[in-house]
Amino acid sequence: MPAEAVTRHDYTGDGLSEEDLAPTPWLQLERWVADADARAVDHDDVYEPRAISVATVDAHGVPNVRTVLLRFLDERGPGFVSSSDSTKGMEISANPHVAAALTWPAMFRAIRFRGTIELVAADEVEAYWASRPWASRISAWASHQSAPANSRAQLEADYDRYAAQFPDHGRPDDVPVPETWKGYRVRATEVEFWGGRSNRLHDRLVFTAVGAGGGAAAQDVATVPSLDDAAAWTVHRRQP
Ligand SMILES: Cc1cc2nc3c(=O)[nH]c(=O)nc-3n(C[C@H](O)[C@H](O)[C@H](O)COP(=O)(O)O)c2cc1C
């Protein structure tokens, strides 16, 4: 596709000023996610407000990125569910350092995270599993995520087999949680709030965990502070 075929948009967002920035990354994150959720209800230009891209690296240090959905969100950081057998699951178990981004182009906003993965506690994962529709729970059993698939027909046959094994009685415990189905939480040491402005003169305000310095992902996950601890974060502005 020729470059001139791509429409150029001027980003007419409000941006983000130091005065408007919340005192902690958690409060700013909560505010922007709430705005995106509301926008998805009121407009048709934000379809999946909680879609988050998560980047990992493989054993050779080569990056990999995919989109997942935000399923856990609190002061510890954004979390998602996935299979520990998947490519991402295996990359995370070999190297827990990740980057992630929530991007809302229609709102001229993005949030970027750098940090380290910690596993979400089993009881939190089970509570979320129980809230999933029966068919989604069956799919989790049928899919060996990221492994080669013989055919679409084989996938559907596997789905039918698990559907017969765990029939839908309308109860949250109809389908057990697969052993490989895990929750992953990003414990961030750097959180950037990006606000698109006119003429490409965007705002970038970055919270960095005190002590994390330039090595945003180099910290032991046990020492990563709460996103809501104002004393644990410093803020600086980056050039667009
Ligand atoms: C909007 C959207 C939401 C998705 N949500 C999830 C999710 O929550 N968990 C998940 O494992 N994969 C999800 N996927 C699929 C992943 O992008 C990816 O294909 C899958 O996790 C396998 O990635 P991997 O092979 O790198 O491990 C989603 C894809 C899209 C486009």
Image (cartoon, rainbow, N blue to C red):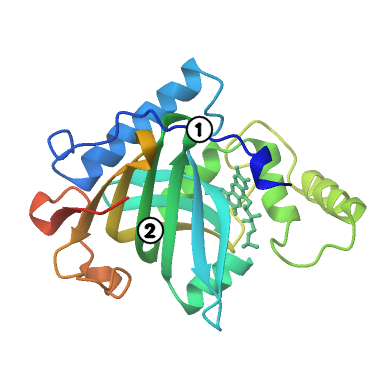
Furthest residue in direction front, as rendered: 4
- Decide: few, some or many residues near mark 2? Use Cα within 10 Å; few <14, some 14-19, many ≥20: many
Under tag 1, what secondary structure?
A: loop
| 95 is higher (above) or lower (below) than 116 | below
> Is residue 120 among what the camera can see?
no
> Is residue 4 among what the camera can see?
yes
- Identify the residue position indicated by label 2 in the image: 186
| Residue located at (30% from left, 75% from top) | 218
> In the rendering, which numbered label is found on residue 34?
none
- Identify the residue position indicated by label 1 in the image: 9
Furthest residue in direction left, as rendered: 231
Residue type beneath disc 1: His
Disc 1 from disc 2: Cα separation: 32 Å
Given residues 48 and 180, the one toward you in this image is 48
| Residue located at (51% from left, 18% from top) | 43
* Residue contact between numbered discs 1 and 2, judged by CB atoms under 8 Å: no
Relative image position of residue 12 (x, y in whole percent): 38, 28
Q: Is mark 1 within 8 Å of ligand 1?
A: no
Relative image position of residue 27 (x, y in whole percent): 22, 39
Under tag 2, what secondary structure?
A: strand
Given residues 188 and 4, the one toward you in this image is 4
Given residues 112 and 224, the one toward you in this image is 112
| 68 is higher (above) or lower (below) than 20 | below
Q: Quadrant of residue 10?
A: top left
* First reached walking from the N terminus: tag 1 or tag 2: 1
| Residue located at (17% from left, 45% from top) | 24
| Residue located at (37% from left, 37% from top) | 199
189 left or right of 1 in image: left
Residue type beneath disc 2: Val
181 left or right of 109 in image: right
Relative image position of residue 47 (x, y in whole percent): 56, 29
